[in-house]
Each structure stands twice: as structure tokens, then as C-alpha cells.
Image (cartoon, helix red, strand yellow):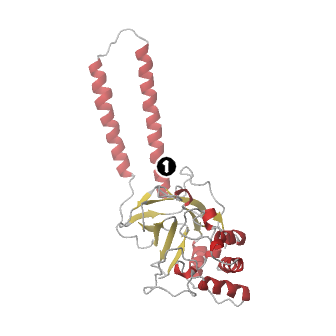
Amino acid sequence: MSAPAAQPAQSALHVAGPVAETLLDVTTVLTVGAALIFGGVMLLLAMSLRGGPRPVRARWWLLGGGIAFPVAVLSALFVYGERHRPAWRPVPPADALVVAVTGRMWWWEVRYDDPRTGRRFATANEIRLPAGRPVYFALASEDVIHSFWVPALGGKMDMVPGRMQHLLLQADAPGRWRGQCAEYCGEQHARMALDVVALAPAEFEAWADAQAQPVAPQAQRSVQAGRDAFLAHRCDACHAVRGVTAPGPDGHDVRRGPDLTHVGGRLSLGAATVPNTPEAMREWVAHTQQLKPGARMPAGDERLPPADIGDIAAWLSGLK
């Protein structure tokens, strides 16, 4: 299943949803208004430098320009802003898809809970949405303050440890955009990105059905060798692979690292650090600390035999 071509990266000027469109409208009003006021101030400055008589007393300038005008402008902006403020929703709309996103150093845990179908599954560093349907994001952090931001779809929302934040977004049409952590969170803050893909409703349903399934049995010897090496070297201590690793007691298997059940089908690795290709997968497993220094994953070349690195990478690339 191919994703739509990427749109301009992290551009709040190329809007793709109603929330982002509202923010762009407000930004345009503020920018144009500020430019007009600045032009008026510069005009008054030019007039004052010309010299000559002053027919209007300074007191009236102070009362009009220093009090009445700012009060009128700020009051109008307050009313305008309140009319465009998104409504707070303590619970998601009845038809919304619920997606829980947890910020971690330095990757994104993504969990889906669809009230329509009852599907619940986890993925990482990539969010796929049904176009035209509201998506209710439940945002949290596991360690430090992060900030969830997909400029083409909406504004920023801080993710604060110990607190649940909510954000309601919607993509108008299929597309692909880049998201980013917008709050400095440590050494790899700049490489804490994510891919956001909106799919046609039928295509999203097919994708979600596949994601909810565990790993299917694979008979090839090379694939089996990768699975065995993955377990032998205790990669499952940090990563879950449904159908291979033991599930958590509540069905939500939370571990230190991303869920890898269908990692081979994702667009990128390491929170959009490198594109997801078989060659990049091997490089990521072998040289994690070279590609993303400080990541919470040791480099494979420091502790694994080269043959096992190749087998693990090949197995993971096959988990579509």
C-alpha cells in the first residue's frame, strides 16, 4: 500500500484541514493588520519630521492613538479570536477515530482505538488517518516536555508528563505531511519527527485491519533465523512484535522501544531519521549511534555478530 507523495515539509502555509485553515486565516488577519498599523505609524513619523505648526494638541494624540485606538483594536481581535477558537472537547465526538500519541526521547508511540470497529493496535513514528473523518488525539509524554505539531493539519500542543492533552484534527483529502516535536527535548530533538499520511476511507480501513493483525507465520529459513536472533539477543526486552513476543497483561504491551509488528511497512526508521529500505534497516540495526547519537538503542555492531545483524534486519524488513 503506497503512501501519497509528500507535501511541502512542515509548512503552515499549505493547509490540509479545517483547523489549519482557521489558523492560517487568523494569522493572515494579524499579519495584514500589523502591517497596516506599522505603515500608519511610519506615516505619522514622516509627518512629524516635516516640521511646521501642530494643529492638533499632543494630548489628543495620546488619548486617541495611545488609548482609544489600541483598546478598539485589541477588543476587536479578542472577539475575532474567540469566534475562531476551537471548542474544547473533554470527550471525542461520536464518529471520531481516537489516536493516543505518547512522546518519548526521541520517538513517538502511537496507539489506535477505533470505537466503530473495536480495533486496538500500536505502531510508532507514523500516523495514518482516514481523510474526511475527525481524529481525536490524546497526547501525553513519558519523560520530558514534548510538543506535537503537524503544521499542515493544526497548531502545536505541548505534551506534559503526568498530564493528558487533547487535540481534534482532520485531513480534508489524502496526502502526506511531516510532523515534528516543537519543544526542545534533548540531544536528538531535531530528529524527533514523524510521517502523517491521510488515506481514502476504504484504504485506511484495509490498512488498519492489517495493522491489527499479529505477525503471520513465515517459513523461510533466513526469515526464521532473523526471528530467532531477535529473541536470542533479547531485542524483545525493548520491542514488541505481536505474534512473536509475549503480550502485556492488558493487551497493551508498553516497552522501552517502538512496537515493531509491522515495521517493514513504515515510511521511515528512527522517527523519520532515515528512509525505510532493507539497506537502511541493516544500517540502523548495526550503526544506531552513528545515525542517531544518544538514541536509547545500542548499536548492533558493538554486541552482535554481523550475520545476526543481517538476519535481524532482513526479518524486520519483511514485517509488512
Q: Is residue 41 above or below residue 192?
A: above
The residue positioned farthest toward the top in the image shown: 52
Quadrant where the N terminus sits is bottom right
Residue 254: x and y, percent?
Answer: 47, 78
Q: Residue at x 54, y 78 (%)?
A: 239
Label 1: few (<14), some (14–19) or many (≥20) C-alpha neighbours in 10 Å: some
Q: Which residue is mark 1?
A: 24
Q: Amino acid at mark 1?
A: Leu
In this picture, residue 316 sits left or right of residue 120: right
Quadrant where the C terminus sits is bottom right
Front one among 232 and 192: 232
Residue 37 visible here: yes
Residue 141: x and y, percent?
Answer: 42, 66
Element type at mark 1: helix
Residue 276: x and y, percent?
Answer: 66, 69
In which quarter of the view is residue 30 placed?
A: top left
Q: Is residue 195 above or below residue 113?
A: above
In which quarter of the view is residue 38 placed?
A: top left
Front one among 266 and 28: 266
Front one among 264 and 155: 264
Residue 303: x and y, percent?
Answer: 62, 75
Front one among 219 and 126: 219
